[in-house]
Amino acid sequence: MPETITNVLDKVNSPEDLKKLEMGDLYKLSNEMRELIIKKVNTIGGHFGPNLGIVEATIALHYVFNSPVDKFVFDVSHQCYPHKILTGRKDGYTNPDNYFKYTGYTAPEETRHDLFKIGHTSTSVSLATGLAKGRDLLGGKENVVAVIGDGSLTGGEALEGLNNAATLNSNIIIIVNDNDMSIAENQGGICNLLTELRENNGVVKDNFFKALGFEYHYIADGHNIENLIETFSKVKDTDHPVLIHMHTIKGKGFEPAVVNKEPFHWILPGTLDRLNDAPAPQKESYESITKDYILNKAEAGEPIIAMSAATPGVFGWNKEFRDKLGLHYIDVGIAEQHAVGMASGIAKRGGKPVLAFMSSFVQRTYDQLSQDMALNNAPVTMLIFWGGISNADATHLCTFDIPLISNIPNIVYLAPTCKEEYVRMLDWSVNQTEHPVAIRVPYEITYSGENDTTDYSILNKYKTEEKGEKVAIVALGDFLGKGRDVKALLKEKTGINATLINPRFITGIDKDMLEGLKSNHSVVITLENGELDGGFGEKITRFYGDSSMKVLNFGSYKEFTDRTSMEELYNRYHLTNELIVQDIRSLL
């Protein structure tokens, strides 16, 4: 890739420096910033298209407003890379040695220019409304600006925020960055509303935003810095709610990302270097197994429907798959709560919804899981992907789904350990009508080599993988392999041949099996790839609470970690095989 030339950016170390630049230099600056973003994201991975599409708007915001006195809230904050470059953190983009120095999202610990840690969607308007109300209570005068885009208006909280922001009767400025995309294609009536406004240059008879009570402005070219500055200057220091609707191009500055927006929303390291490579052979995965299963059911005429809340790529549900399914697929937009409610309605009417979530995003659905789905025993199949301890950013941790889901009555939460169990569980869940069922899909595919004939309608029956004595290892889901390794190391170090148990059910305990362990075991350990507090292992500990059985639970602590290495986390949580065996020996 060409060497980055940063002549203008060399002069810009803070937003104040922007205000000294001529218009021509502002455009040069936008080009330099794009080069930096392209180079960095291709090197370490991250959000690509969203950041390329908001460069000029970010320059104009900082040119007109006075951050950090004026407050900016970036929705999802995956559009904050240009903002970071302009607010004292450009060394994280100009110097490859500092590429990991700053998080990919807004972070108050990095600068006063960031108010919130934000990684989930549709929250900026609510947060900004709160900032504005707090300012009014304290007699402040600063501008409060919320930037929302990438389909985030489809989220319920965004609409709730707009509903209240419109009646503030004081300064709040909401910028709708309309790039005609979500993560995948934009969906629903909100999308149609924005399309109509774009096609009519912001002038329509029934303007939703005006109807709510906003002063409305439309910017046809969200990359024209002069127009952006003019509009932002016009609304600065307003005394009433304002909404600016600007049309931008997601991926601007990198043509493949403009032409094919979905795969360039977020990219892996080296993606741009492999654009001309032949596609790698597709290996079997849980994603491919799921796709094949759903397609086969749909082609057989069954009322199955695959459902996503704007993130089909997480599950490998590419456009080809979606097009093949036709009416058997729906993307509800960034609306996880609605997805659960809608799936529950489909299931009650006799349909077979298969609803997929990334673990981090299922957090948004708690009330609907409890009320709409579980309380009504709607037989929804819910697939939870990427659940487990990881080195992710604090905003996208996937360690909390077990405590969240498994403690709601009526839900059956399953943890397969291999392809054979997964296929059996999926088929049982789709065809049964008694329970809402969630399946925690492992990340890496493994095989048992044996056909699973388990009747999962007999709830909470654990499977003894290997019989032993003295120590029982209850290893949940994708930690069964770790359980085997711990068993082998324990035998090597102590001569103890431990029992290895595959519980399969997260939501309940096998009382008969656990009671039976008392006869020739003195220690039970549990292994789970997630948070211990409220998790699976505590159920086992509670069962043995009035007995002499000693129990050790291994999993993650109740904490937000932030890009912490797996090595550090496994040592902190005593999840290395050596530390687990050491703890068992100490207890013995």
Image: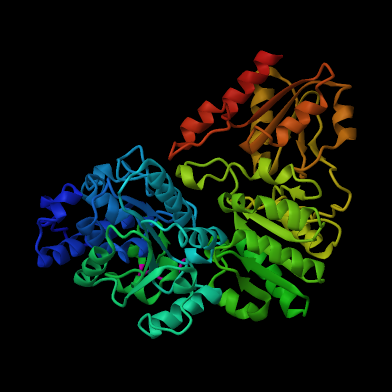
Q: How far across and how far down the image is residue 368, in percent?
A: 69, 55
Image quadrant in which the N terminus is located:
bottom left
Q: Is 397 left or right of 492, judged from the image as shown?
A: left
- Image position, residue 199 (x, y; %): 39, 85
Please give the count of numbered marks on the rendered protein.
0
Quarter of the C terminus within the rendering = top right
User: Residue at 68% of width from left, 28% of height from top?
Assistant: 553
Q: Is residue 47 above or below residue 224?
A: above
Segment tinted magenta in the rendering: 275-280
Which secondary structure type mostly characterizes the magenta part of the structure? loop
Colouring: rainbow
State the residue in front, 536 or 487: 536
Rendered residue at 71%/53% (across/down): 369
Residue 285, visible in the rendered structure: no
In the image, residue 56 above or below residue 498: below
- Magenta span contains residue 389: no
Place residue 506 in its image quadrant.
Answer: top right
Direction from residue 174 to residue 295 in the image, left or right: right
**Residue positioned 84% across, 18% down in the render:** 547
Residue 142, position in %: x, y? Answer: 30, 49
Q: Is residue 292 above or below residue 79?
A: below
Vertical placement of residue 222 versus 105, above or below? below
Question: Residue visible at 13% across and 51% down?
Answer: 17
Tell me where residue 219 sits by quadrant.
bottom left
Nearest the camera: 384 or 515?
384
Q: Is residue 10 visible?
A: yes
> Is residue 485 rendered to the left or right of residue 130?
right
Residue 320 coordinates in the image, percent (x, y) = 55, 77
